[in-house]
Amino acid sequence: MLKRIVQACFLIIGGTLGILFLPNLFNLLHINDIPVINNSYVTAILGAIIFYLITFWAVDYVFNFITWAEDSLVKIPVTDVLFGSLGLIFGLLVAFLVGFALNAVQVPVLNAVAPILLTLLFGYLGFQVGFKKRDELLGLFGKGSSKKKSSEEESEKEAKQSLKILDTSVIIDGRVADICQTGFLEGTIVIPQFVLAELQHIADSSDVLKRNRGRRGLDILNRIQKELAIKVEIYEGDFDEISEVDSKLVKLAKITNGILVTNDFNLNKVCELQNVSVLNINDLANAVKPVVLPGEELTVQVIKDGKEYHQGVAYLDDGTMIVVEEGREYIGKRIEVLVTSVLQTSAGRMIFAKPKLLEKAL
């Protein structure tokens, strides 16, 4: 259908150019004495035929260019297009006003060249300012409208806050599907297209471990989308000026005012520094772990050496690591330990203990 439209446009252009320029061409060739070719209908038909023949060579190039432009525009976020267009319109308006003022100065060269240069300069500057200042403009418009429609904005903000943006690590982790199934994660799950692309790249890796992790992530997404009663949306936009996926996620969370769901400790810290709402799956897992207090007794099996001298390492059933002081000699044995301290971070929980037998000996 698009190719037919392109061919029709070529025919219209050819007919118009035929009416305008073919008579002059016939005059140069001294064949204007023939009455038939001086007819405007004939020149329009000849121009249309010439351009129709050109379409057999040019239509594919025009079609590919239009398709590329359409795909590029679809991927651009609507806020970028809107504020870039507003900036362009404002810049062209300023260029017109400045050019109108310069017309008062009767300088032929200046009056001919200045409007073109002003249009290019202010049009470019207006587009760039509108595009790069879109976040500030959004905040400015939001403050102005809040005075009139505060209740509507609050409801809209709540709707945006219900957006949960998943990053690559939390998808591969897999626990997010179980959390959604239990109903603890509500709202709309947003999966950016650039995250899907990264998952696909991992799934196509030559490394077996990476390939399995990528395929597992895709399976988790398929489960969330088809098996769970939760709304899932794919964000088609991208931020071409940003190369790292983590930075794109932070940018998307800022624009949509959504909440980023991750288990990446470093990304969690970046979100906190940039005032972006974040849900860390590891924080949730640590919060629901059984509380262990200093002075409690536990029965554990020491399985390996620790980092420090004479330390042993054991694990609880939920995966919590226990560092046993003077526990190296008990490797492979099940012993009772006394908790001395507990270290809690977003990266996990670590328990320090010492053998109860050593405590009795002291």
Image (cartoon, rainbow, N blue to C red):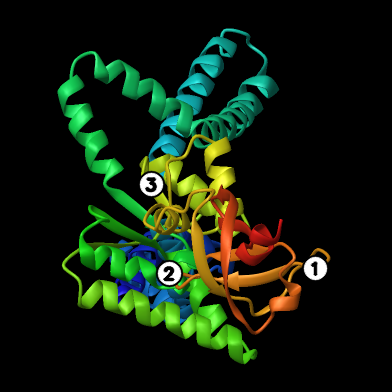
Quadrant of the image for the N terminus? bottom left
For residue 289, above or below residue 1: above
Q: Name which residue type carries label 1.
A: His
For residue 295, above or below residue 207: above
Locate residue 282 relative to residue 120 in the image: left or right: left
Q: Nearer the viewer, mark 2 or mark 1?
A: 1
The spot of residue 197 in percent (x, y) is: 49, 72
Evaluate whether residue 300 shows in this view. Answer: yes
The one nearer the camera, 234 or 19, is 234
Alpha-carbon distance for marks 2 and 1? 39 Å
Classify mark 1: helix, strand or loop: loop
Kindly check if marks 3 and 1 are in contact, taking CB atoms under 8 A apart as contact: no
Residue extending furthest front?
A: 361
The spot of residue 360 in percent (x, y) is: 64, 60
Q: Earlier in the sequence, mark 2 or mark 1?
A: 2
Residue located beneath label 2 in the image: 171
Residue 121: image tag: none
Q: Name which residue type carries label 2.
A: Ile
Alpha-carbon distance for marks 3 and 1? 44 Å
Q: Name which residue type carries label 3.
A: Ile
Evaluate whether residue 32 shows in this view. Answer: no
Residue located beneath label 3 in the image: 259
Q: Quadrant of residue 357?
A: bottom right
Q: Residue at x 74, y 69 (%)?
A: 306
Total numbered badges shown on the rendered structure = 3
Residue extending furthest top?
A: 104
For residue 353, above or below residue 48: above
Q: Quadrant of residue 331?
A: bottom right
Residue located beneath label 1 in the image: 310
Q: Earlier in the sequence, mark 3 or mark 1?
A: 3
